[in-house]
Image: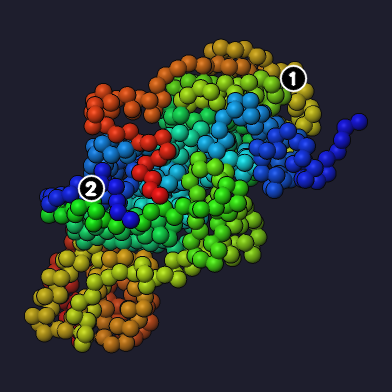
Amino acid sequence: MSTVLETTEQLADKHPIAPYLRMDRMPHIWCPTCGIGTVVRCYAKALEESGVDLDKAAIVSGIGCTGRVAGYMKLDAFHTTHGRAIPFATGLKLGRPELLVTVFSGDGDLSGIGGNHLIHTARRNMDMLVVLVNNFIYGMTGGQNAPTTPLTAKSSTMPFGNFERPFNLPHLAASCGATYVARWTSLHIRRMTKSFKEAIQRKGFRFVEVIAPCSTLYARLNKLGTGFDLMRFYHDNAEIRHGADTREVDIGYQDKIVCGKFVDEERPTFLEAMNEHYTKILGDRYVPMSPEGGWIHE
Amino acid sequence: MKTDPAGVLTGAHYLDGDYACGEGAMAAGCRFVAGYPITPSTEVVERIARRFPMMGGTFIQMEDELASMAAVVGASWTGTKSMTVTSGPGFSLMMENIGLAAMMETPCVVVNVQRGGPSTGLPTMVGQADMMQARWGSHGDYEPIALCPQSPQEAFDLTIDAFNLSEKYRVPVMFMMDECVGHMTEKVVIPEADTIEVVPRRLTSAKPGSYLPYATNGGDVPEFARAGDGHRFHTTGLTHDERGYPDMSADCQETCVRRLLDKVKGHVDDIVRFDEEDTDGADVVLVTYGITARVARMGMDLARKRGVKVGVIRLIVVWPFPEKRIRELARQIKAFVVPEINYGQMVLEVERCAAGNAAAVPVSHGGGGVHDPQVICDAIVRAAK
């Protein structure tokens, strides 16, 4: 029989990722069977297994359900404005280049209102890991249509079904220049963790999309059953195809979900390109910003 | 403390206001700038982009002004002094993250080289119609600080002051230039680095684990922790408690937002700055700022020749407004005359503070040029009657 943990103290004592979380903020706001918590757990596990210096790790979120992740991670954490997590993270990285910067946010935040920042930051190969949790819908505001809502799926603002073509996010990121692109569902705990670990160790713009259930809104509006039914659906319909052509990984309504690592390549990051270029052009006159930041006094 | 000499181009130069502003930022120790091209402000970042690589600074041209302002707030949280530069349309886009800077209490400087508006307006021509936007542009209640230079020399000097005020009070500071000052070329003297005083980021001495990002310990302004120093703090644009944790309650809103206002309101005497001349015994006092202050001076001289006793208040810090002094003067004079390159913005503040004790006369110019000094003179003469 499993043990039921009743208090946050018990959780703090017993949960393996408690040291990575702000236990004084538990319980979290996510609905039962929401997939975001699973993704957080995998990310924390990846941090642990990567052995990174947590004092130098910063996390940035935008707004929305996944936007709350920064609030629960025990790192330097920034809960910013809607869509602006990526440019905020750009500032953090360039202001203190030694930081390991992760952006953790949702599909609406990063590919809807923040879409312009997503493509340009991938183009620059800015050094950050972007974890995009895709639940096909705007969760926190009540189930509105997202740029990821599959064709014909219902949302509160497309009550007769969505007729707008959604983004194929791995393809978008890859075609803009992301050097690491993977997709998993929240069912793929070990593979997702492995992807996060790999991505943490890579440089440049790393993009991991995780398909996650929203049983409160997406599943209810589309009569897809419970959280368990959604996980069962992932189990039956996820297809792992490492190295798949990203043009072919778009997601149809209740159709197969192609998962795997699609891109893993090396290209100079923004900072590497800048340093190399200025060194070549300016020689000894070039003074790069210190890894600890620009002219920090005291 | 003294500034980093690497950013100080000591000497006498012939610079336009935009370049002088860029030099001021570098002299103040600014080492991160994010911006998006927009006339008539772009020369500021062009100057910086050319000089930053030699002093350990990073400039990045972002995809838009939303991103520029977001990057500036992010960079400032590393302790690196940060700035962005824009004009009206970009200033509108920046308002979202100016609010975030205010809420997170992030020191930063936002330069707006004003052009004619609304919308695309007069991209290459002067305006002063963003003055109320500088005060009220982002939603919700907050107290920004705004400065207004009247010359390239002041564009240099006051940019340093803008950084210092932003550090001291942990607020976004609006640097409200105008196209004329931005594109006017004059002598600019940049002093030796060891004479330039800068306010350092007030870093916390708390041990990791005990730091509370928004605890003020009875003061007004909390101590700062840089990302990457091991404090593992949390900050948010949501209404928050001392831990930086969201607290959705009217009580927390009162504590959180009230302090954002009080930390500036409680120090207006330290922040407010203006030049005052010949107000003793004056019947009329000009209230003016930016390029218009220089044009108005000619109008004032013309009015004096016609026998009017006229003095002047030139605003250097425009927000917070020198409320106390305007109230005092209102009881001694007949009228304030307020020429500005808009259809009446700062005059509303003058009128509010005059509270019926003196008239507040707008002298409007819609933008695209400066006032005819004769028009200002005539307004002064009429107001004196």
Q: In which quadrant will I find the N terminus of chain B?
A: bottom left
Q: Which residue is mark 2?
A: B8
Q: Are marks 1 and 2 in contact (CB under 8 Å)?
A: no
In the rendering, at what x and y percent does residue B352 appear? 38, 76
Q: Nearer the viewer, residue B254 or B120?
A: B254
Check the image and name the residue furthest to the right: A1
Chain at tag 1: A
Q: Residue at x 49, y 30 (%)?
A: A128
Q: Residue at x 20, y 87 (%)?
A: B281
Chain at tag 2: B
Query: Which secondary structure, mark 1?
Result: helix
Kindly identify which numbered label has been placed on residue A275. none
Q: Is residue A264 above or below residue B9?
A: above
Foreground label between 1 and 2 = 2
CA separation in Å, label 1 and label 2:
62 Å
Amino acid type of the residue tagged 2 in the rendering = Val
Kindly identify which numbered label has been placed on residue A235. 1
Query: Is B118 situated left or right of A240 in this image?
Result: left
In the rendering, at what x and y percent does residue B24 appear? 25, 51
Neighbours of disc 2 within 10 Å: few (<14), some (14-19), many (20+): many
Which quarter of the picture shows residue B381?
bottom left
Amino acid type of the residue tagged 1 in the rendering = His
Q: Is residue B165 above or below residue A145?
A: below
Query: Which secondary structure, mark 2?
Result: loop
